[in-house]
Amino acid sequence: MNHRDIIVFDFETTGRNAERCQPTQIAAVAIHARKLKIQPNGIFESTMRCITNDDKAIAAGFDPIEEGALEVTKRTRASLAKGPMPKTVWKNFAKFCDQFNFKKTPWYAPIAAGYNINGFDMKIVDRLCREYGPTNDKNGEQKIFHPIHRIDLMQHIYCWFENHGEVNKYNMDYLREYFGMPNDNAHDALQDVKDTANILIRFLKLQRNIINNNKVQFKNAFANGNFDIT
């Protein structure tokens, strides 16, 4: 039974390469592990300043700002140059997450959750932790979230709908429309994490209902020797 809180988070960035883009916004909501409700003081959001001169960005090891990213996030280079410094934002985000590590050890750190975090957002977390901390002293890995468990809603959705004829796309804009959610403020990090959290909570409630009411029997499911692959 999970007793670690779940933090749903999202970055907006200057591009699609998680290893070389600059984060421009981060938002998160902390979900109580058992109640599946937002924790008190459980919302975090901040813009992040980035290098807007492409030559200087390249010199610093980043990709140039993608114009498509500006269109999606509805931001300008001028506005991106005015946010708080990345180090300050990251320290504040780490402090926010640490509130929900109730034993202050890596194994009770909150579980990272989000949409496509395995392929994108966690790579940025790792990069920012290497630059600003915190990292594990033994292996240098990020120390904000639980070191093993995480929930990537995109993979979760795929497992539920991989044989469902109605769902043929897996991006958030499509899923908002499919689930009947408004598309207002899409690609604002805070709105994205709220939408992701609402979908995740609905699926977690469904799964708990199936398990807790014995609608599916998992224990000893193969005891009769009935295997699909032998």
Image (spheres, grey):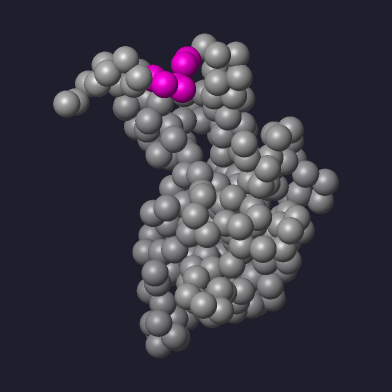
Residue reaching furthest to the left: 230
Please tell me whether residue 105 belongs to the stretch shown in magenta.
no
Main secondary structure found in the magenta portion: loop
Q: Is residue 187 visible?
A: no
Dividing the image into 4 quarters, which one contains the N terminus?
A: top right
Q: Assign the C terminus to one quadrant of the image.
A: top left
Question: Compared with residue 57, is residue 28 higher up or lower down, i.e. above or below?
Answer: above
* Position of residue 171 in the picture relative to residue 89 (left or right): left
Relative placement, left or right, of 52 versus 1 is left
Q: Which residues are magenta?
A: 216-221
Q: Is residue 220 magenta?
A: yes
Expressed as whole percent of the image width and height from the top left, the position of residue 45 reads 69, 57
Q: Is residue 104 visible?
A: yes
Tell me: residue 136, above or below residue 27. Answer: below
Nearer to the camera, 81 or 148: 148
Q: Residue at x 51, y 50 (%)?
A: 149
Q: Residue furthest right?
A: 40
State the residue at coordinates (39%, 69%): 19
Residue 82 in which image quadrant: bottom right
x and y, in percent, of residue 145 in the image:
59, 59
